Image: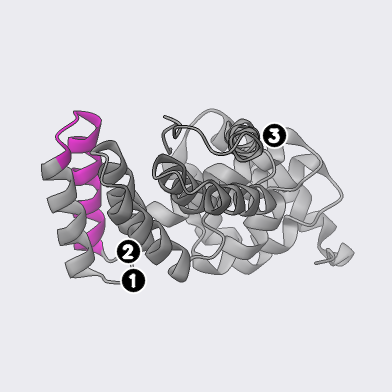
Amino acid sequence: MLLDYGKTADAQRLVRTLGAKLYCGDMQAALAAVREQFTIETLVEFLASPCRDVRKVSAMALAIAGDSTAVRALAAALHDSDDQVAAQAEQALWSIWFRSGKGAARTALACGCNHMAHRNFDTAIEKFSWSLALDGNFAEAHNQRAIAYFLQERYEEAIADCRAALQRIPEHFGAMAGMGHGHAQLGRYTEARRCYADALLIHPRLEGIQTSLGQVEQLLACGAPPSMGSKPR
């Protein structure tokens, strides 16, 4: 996507208006400014700006105000030449994915994440399942339940939930990597290699996955000895 250079002044205004608020963490003021002065479509367009600061602030703004319409452009920004822009794009994607469900489903998801952080995995799975009962298209509820299943060593169920998340959001690099982890634990190294490679095609800077890919390639070269112990995000 090429930037309409007639909007250069708007891009500069974006940095002036939102930059300070976002950098200092004044999210409420930043959100109000975004909603008042910029559309999501404009912020997506600014992700193609030749100016690094515009791209970075646009990604930061989409983290607080973006929706599913911004996912494809943010996924493209994961390949940005600037590490900080890519990092902000990743954060924006996670933020959008976590808030993409219906209201009550988001509440159940948050509750499940809290239980998972305290290693109450059975209760976490119950909350994620309730979230999906409220909104069957909530991809992040599938992804978080996949993580809980993985941590309980229920790898087939984890893979199924990763697959469900990817059916709803093909750009979900976390679910793709998680599916790779599940296959690796089950000794399916060819499938794990494919998932890791696909995750890196979506997000080339994905932390740890290049290492995981190298490990399964070594295992395949050696005749697939015992499975690995890596964990998904």
Q: Secondary structure at mark 2?
A: loop
**Residue 158 image offset from top left, x and y in percent:** 32, 52
For label 1, the residue is 137
Real-space Cα separation, disc 3 to disc 1, in angstroms: 31 Å
Image coords of residue 8 (percent x, y) = 84, 57
* Residue 109 shows up from this direction: yes
Give the foreground label among 1 and 2: 1
Quadrant containing the N terminus is bottom right
* Residue 128 forms part of the magenta stretch: no
Q: Disc 1 or 2, which lies upstream in sequence? A: 2
Check contact, mark 1 vs mark 2: CB within 8 A. Answer: yes
Residue nearest the observer in this picture, 207 or 101: 207
Mark toward the start of the polypeptide (2 vs 3): 3
Answer left or right for 127 relative to 10. Answer: left
Span of residues in magenta: 103-121
Checking the image for residue 42, the label placed there is none
Give residue 84's mark: 3
Closest to the camera, between mark 3 and mark 1, is 1
Q: Residue at x 84, y 45 (%)?
A: 51
Q: Amino acid at mark 3?
A: Gln
Q: Earlier in the sequence, mark 3 or mark 1?
A: 3
Q: Amino acid at mark 2?
A: Gly
Residue marked by disc 2: 101
